[in-house]
Amino acid sequence: MNESTPAPFVVPCRDLPPSAPFRWLAAGWRDLVRAPMLTSVFGAIVVVVSLAVAAMAWHLGRFALLAALLSGFVFVAPLIGVGLYGVSRALERGEVPRFKDCFALVRRIVGQAGVFALVQMVILLLWSRAGMMVNAFVPIEDGSLVSLLEFLALGSLFGSVFAVATFAIAAFSLPMIADRDVDMVTAGISSVNAVLRNKATALVWAALIAALTAVGLATAFLGLAIVMPWLAYAAWHGYREALDASAWPSLEAEGAEPGSTRSSA
């Protein structure tokens, strides 16, 4: 595509079978095996941050503090994810992944990752507010099983809406901004579009993420050292299979700041 031809507003997406996420996990595992040192470094960061959040919340026992810490993690997690996408990106290109290259990639897209984090923060705050509203309109009465079930049903309904929104935006957007010169709005809309076009595949992918994350949490967060890098590598391969972002210039190839242009050379 030449400079006079603008890139489309939404990145074209492909139709994917429900079995596709299992391919992504297989490819992600191969990346994990091929880059054990970097995987260990990023995995250790994930575990340390997770343990710090849990320990401080447990020690101080304040919901406001927990919310603040989780809010901080919302901003840190995308940067960790981008670093891991850099590993898969390098391996896909036949290069040797290096920590300094991953760190350089993180620095280049920190602005776009910040926009992503802010969007997730807004959803988190709305989710929290919705939970308080549910508790206000459907209070749980002592010893009343009916009121408890009503609260859980309505809370789950509202929670599922925010969970779907969060997943749809995040599914493919972060790997894309780590790979191409694209703004976060385009990446987010393209991710939502791909999820809506592949509902069954997205459902399988979300279930796998939830199951593997639960395993990581069940091991006192230690399992996250493997699970989180594995899922990040798999997400990279999911993005590469789901979206055709060839109309946008590669960050390295063009040497441009992320989101600075909507056309490719």
Image (cartoon, rainbow, N blue to C red):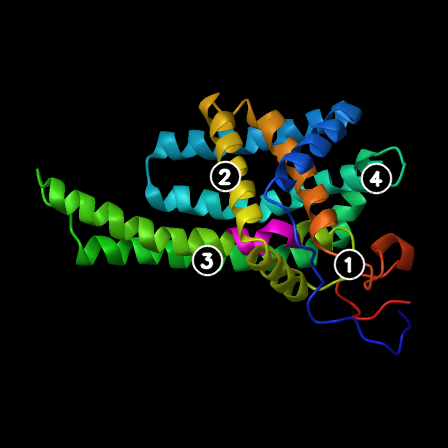
Tell me the quadrant of the picture where the N terminus can be found.
bottom right
Q: Is residue 52 left or right of residue 59?
A: right
> Which stretch is magenta?
167-173
Q: Which residue in the protein does label 1 denote?
A: 245
Give the number of the disc on residue 30. Answer: none
- Type of amino acid at the residue the image marks with label 3: Ile
Residue drawn 66% across the image and 45% down it: 79
Q: Which of marks 2 and 3 is nearer the N terminus?
A: 3
Residue highlighted by disc 2: 207
Q: What's the CA distance linking mark 1 and mark 4? A: 15 Å
Residue at image point 46% right, 57% down: 123
Element class at badge 3:
helix
Task: Tell me the element at label 4.
Answer: helix
- Residue sticking out furthest to the left: 143
Residue type at tag 4: Glu
Q: Position of residue 153 (x, y in %)?
A: 25, 48
Which residue extends farthest bottom? 4
Whole-number angstrom distance, CA of label 4 to CA of label 2: 26 Å
Q: Mark 4 points at which residue?
A: 92
Instruction: Look at the image and tell me in which quarter the C terminus lies.
Output: bottom right
Q: How far apart are marks 3 and 1 (CA)?
A: 26 Å
Sequence-wise first label, 3 or 1: 3
Q: In which quarter of the image is residue 4?
A: bottom right
Which tag is nearer the camera, tag 3 or tag 1? 1
Indicate yes or no whether the magenta region holds residue 256.
no
Q: Mark 3 points at which residue?
A: 123
Q: What residue type is labelled 1?
A: Ala
Query: Which secondary structure is most common in the magenta stretch?
Result: helix
Question: Of tags 4 and 2, which is closer to the observer?
Answer: 2
Q: Residue at x 68, y 67 (%)?
A: 10
Q: Which of 132 and 48 is in front in this view?
A: 132
